[in-house]
Amino acid sequence: MNNRRVIVKVPASTANLGPGFDTLGMALSLYSWIEMSAAEKTTFRLYGDQMQGIPTDKSNLIYKVAQLVFEEAGVVVPELDVAMYSDIPLTRGLGSSASAIIGALVAANALIGNPLTDDKLFQLATKLEGHPDNVGASLFGGIVVSAWDGERADYVRLEPHVKLETLVAIPAFQLSTEKARHCLPTQISMADAVFNVGRSSLLVAALASGELGLIRHAMRDRLHQPYRAALIPGMTAILESAADYGALGAALSGAGPTLIAFVDETSKSKSELEQFLLGTLKQEGIVADTMWLKPSSEGPVIIVEDSASSAPDLMERIKGEVVR
Ligand code: HSE
């Protein structure tokens, strides 16, 4: 096996953007890093708070996903040296698992000379994650509109408007996607379906054409947010009133509990909006962190080095880039 070392930087993502349940995703300027090389014996170096409790044997997700790539490509790389660091909080609705899946797919593919196309990686990632929204955004960057029929995911990537910025309020509690999907109904009314088709279509058109003023009307949803509201106290008030505090629109980020407001980066009311989000959550007894994030136009950034032995440690390499 070659002694190549691959380092991949992958963006976080926000899914749904309100009405586009399991369909819309946008990459965000918060990242995780995976380093991978072939080894004689499998080892893991997991850095930072987000990695606590993550397995360091061959049941590790990164290892398993990498093996899937090798299998697809018909090559054998049984032992890997893997290092990982992430600034993306776990189970908060910012696509941490999607970014890990994409990082593992892209790193493993680069390690063996990129035999799989991006489209193939997207299909594999969608199957692994169960929906294409977060993985599409982390893989292609920007805004990704995708539809999956259980077999194939098709997508279109849109370039985010240059003035688009987001404010995320990340509650201090975790909410598993499984729990947040469990509370959804199995059937909905025709009126709610039409409501969401209208909003989601309008949102995609507004984002594609740069009509940011339409976002506040287009971000409304009746498919999932109303049912998830009970799990995130303060959410309903924030979604209803964020636009009155200067947001272009607001939504639950993915399955939550993070809330995301879209903002014109030249807005004069950024601190009022931030105070409104934090104050509303605080009234409900919820402690939250806020972050201002830009859409990430780029998907994974890949570095391939040829000599594995003399390179600096992952943390040494990325120390100027990490947030936490
Ligand atoms: N579209 C998914 C959901 C995103 O809302 O459940 C979760 O990662």
Image (cartoon, rainbow, N blue to C red):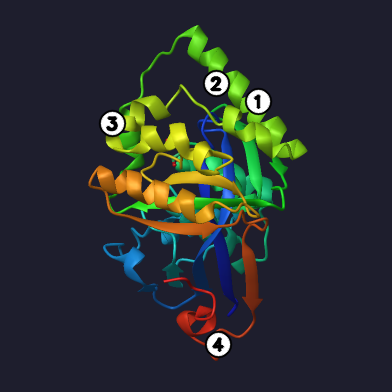
Q: Is residue 101 visible to the viewer in this orientation of the structure?
A: no
Q: CA distance from mark 2 to mark 3?
A: 20 Å
Q: CA distance from mark 3 to mark 4?
A: 49 Å
Residue plotted at (53% across, 80% down): 320
**Mark 2 residue type:** Asn
Point out residue 258 in the picture as x, y percentages from the top left corner: 40, 46
Q: Earlier in the sequence, mark 1 or mark 4?
A: 1
Q: Earlier in the sequence, mark 4 or mark 2?
A: 2
Q: Earlier in the sequence, mark 1 or mark 2?
A: 2
- Label 4 SS: loop
> CB of mark 1 within 8 Å of CB of mark 4?
no
Q: Measured along the vertical axis of the image, is residue 42 above or below residue 308? A: above
**Mark 3 residue type:** Ala
Write down the residue under mark 1.
Answer: 201
From the viewer's side, name the closer residue of 61 and 287.
287
Q: Measured along the vertical axis of the image, is residue 167 above or below residue 56? A: above
Point out residue 257 in the picture as x, y percentages from the top left corner: 36, 44
- Label 2 SS: helix
Q: CA distance from mark 4 to mark 2?
A: 50 Å
Frontmost of labels 4 and 2 is 2
From the viewer's side, name the closer residue of 93 and 314.
93
Residue 237 sits in which quadrant? top left
Residue 196: image tag: 2
**Mark 1 residue type:** Ser
274 vs 229, left or right, is: right
Q: CA distance from mark 1 to mark 3?
A: 27 Å
Write down the residue under mark 4.
Answer: 311
Residue plotted at (57% across, 67% down): 8
Residue plotted at (54% across, 37% down): 17
**Mark 4 residue type:** Ala
- Label 1 SS: helix
